[in-house]
Image: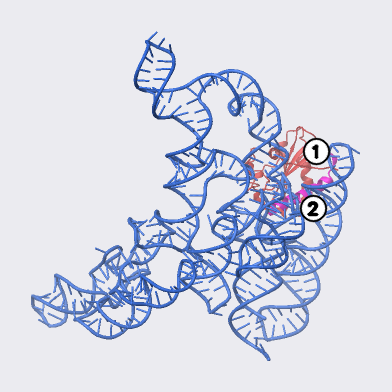
Chain colours: A red, B blue
Amino acid sequence: MATIERLKKRPDFLAAAAGRRFHTDRMTAQGRLRESEAGGLRLGLTVTKRVGHATERNRIKRRLRAVVAEVAASLPADLAARTADIVLIARRPALDAAFATLADDLRQALPAVTRPPKPGAGESAGRPRPSSRRGGRPAAPPAPPNERVGVPDGQ
RNA sequence: UCAGCCGGCCGGGCGGCCGCUCCGGGGUUCGCCCCGGGGAGGAAAGUCCGGGCUCCAUGGAGAGACGGUGCCGGAUAACGUCCGGCGGGGGCGACCCCAGGGACAGUGCCACAGAGAGCAGACCGCCCCGGACUCGUCCGGGGUCAGGGUGAAAGGGUGCGGUAAGAGCGCACCGCGGACGCGGCAACGCGGACGGCAUGGCAAACCCCACCGGGAGCAAAACCGAAUAGGGGCGGCGCGCCCCUCGCGAGAGGGGCAGGCCCGCUCUCCAGGCCAGUCGCCCGGGUUGGUUGCUCGAGGCGGUCGGCGACGACCGUCCCAGAGGAAUGGCCGCCACGUCGGGGGGUGCGAGCCCUCCGGCCCUACAGAACCCGGCUUACAGGCCGGCUGAUCCA
């Protein structure tokens, strides 16, 4: 049975932000293929302050962790063996969305963001340009760091 | 029964499946597994005060600056908190609200309006005197603040006397100040000779007075830990300037001043320490990560005693979250509560209230520990308990 490690280091989060993306109304998924180390999936959660207050952010993170655990239990072996980091950026509707809906979102997102690069060069065309109002931040990799730290504000 | 005031408390429950973290015990192929137990709040929040703790400084004293507090007494480790009083204000009342020291130490401000706003003031008006003439008006000089008018505020109020008109000018009452006396630990209260009324307000204006205060914070701090450099320790040698005397000189002797740094806001003083250069030997490792700090504490609960009370003393008993991209939950079912819509029934003139059924919603409000305590402030669906006040009804 497959398991998914938790992502905890800040540089890993920043690296994943440069990878492939997958959007739903509930969340945005970002994926990055790791070069080195052993195989397996790792996943981190980001819930920014703009989503809601601390209580609401915590609830979203707990529900997403439960979703991850459930999805991981029934993951195909080839998908689970991919060497990739995923970051889920929660959005406001994740607070009230049905549990099954969140699970479906994740099941769709996982293969999408961890797909190995095709030999063809059509990569950038298929990638959604995040220039819309989503998050309102530039698409450049050195993004403002504070925006995507999932830590509850330390004040 | 209705309206209201004060204090205290709760803030979903039960069950099923699957998880997280810490502690204790056991097992292990060292990956982990099994058993038992603990696991968010009254505000965990805002970070506004007060402490503990840690680091920075070698201790002590004084002055200044800056900041804070501000009726009195008490409680407390401390507080800007709390308790009990006082004074002022509001309410029929239970009760509630108030940054509430000093304006004869000084400086300053009091806009606009108004004649005049701080050693007051004459615009209209009133009155007296003189003059002019067209004979009831004008001009000049003077008195006056009762009236008009302005203003937040016009130098006590009302009445009588008094006067040319007036005025505490005189008198009565009220107000105000007030030596002194009495009560109270005190704030303050009560009485009050006497004073013809004087010291108008603002100190969330400067200021004065009294009291308090070093700074930064658990991302503090300590330890483990790979490399270079800075760095640290020990030991040897070495010690600035001026004057006088001796000496050809290197230098020697005596006297005086000692330079710089360390007193984490500044300055001064006392005590004390260090450095000033070079050589040799040894130690050591900024950051990432790990461990500690990290939960037994001004602790919870129960009781007795003291106190009006805040609270204190004593006895008994309990161990009660310790995460670290951050655990304390996820999903489902049932029930209760609330709310919305609809049907039926009861009651009432009626708004409405009560009972019951069906469906939907929220599936709970505010809100998530981050070193720990004491407070304050702010947010909060709904509910429970106790005491009290005012109406109304019955006896």
Residue count near mark 1 (Cα–Cα under 10 Å), binned few <14, some 14–19, many ≥20: some
Residue plotted at (80% across, 38% down): A40
In this view of the protein, which residue sits in the foreground, A109 or B240? B240
Q: How many marks overall?
A: 2
Q: Mark 1 falls within which chain?
A: A
Magenta residues, start to end: A55-83
Mark 2 and mark 1 lie on one chain; the one further toward the N terminus is 1
| Image quadrant where residue A130 sits | top right
Between label 2 and label 1, give the one nearer the viewer. Answer: 1
Magenta span dominant secondary structure: helix
| Above or below: residue B287 compared with residue B362 | above
**SS for dot 2:** helix
Tell me, yes or no, whether the two marked residues, 2 and 1, touch with CB atoms within 8 Å: no
Check disc 2 and report the residue beneath it.
Answer: A100
In the image, residue A138 above or below residue B80: above
**Residue nearest the viewer, comparing B131 with A129:** B131
Is A114 placed above or below A50 here? above
Q: Is residue A36 left or right of residue B138?
A: right
Q: Which quadrant of the structure image shows residue A18?
A: top right
Q: What is the x, y in percent for residue B115? A: 27, 67
Q: Secondary structure at mark 1?
A: loop
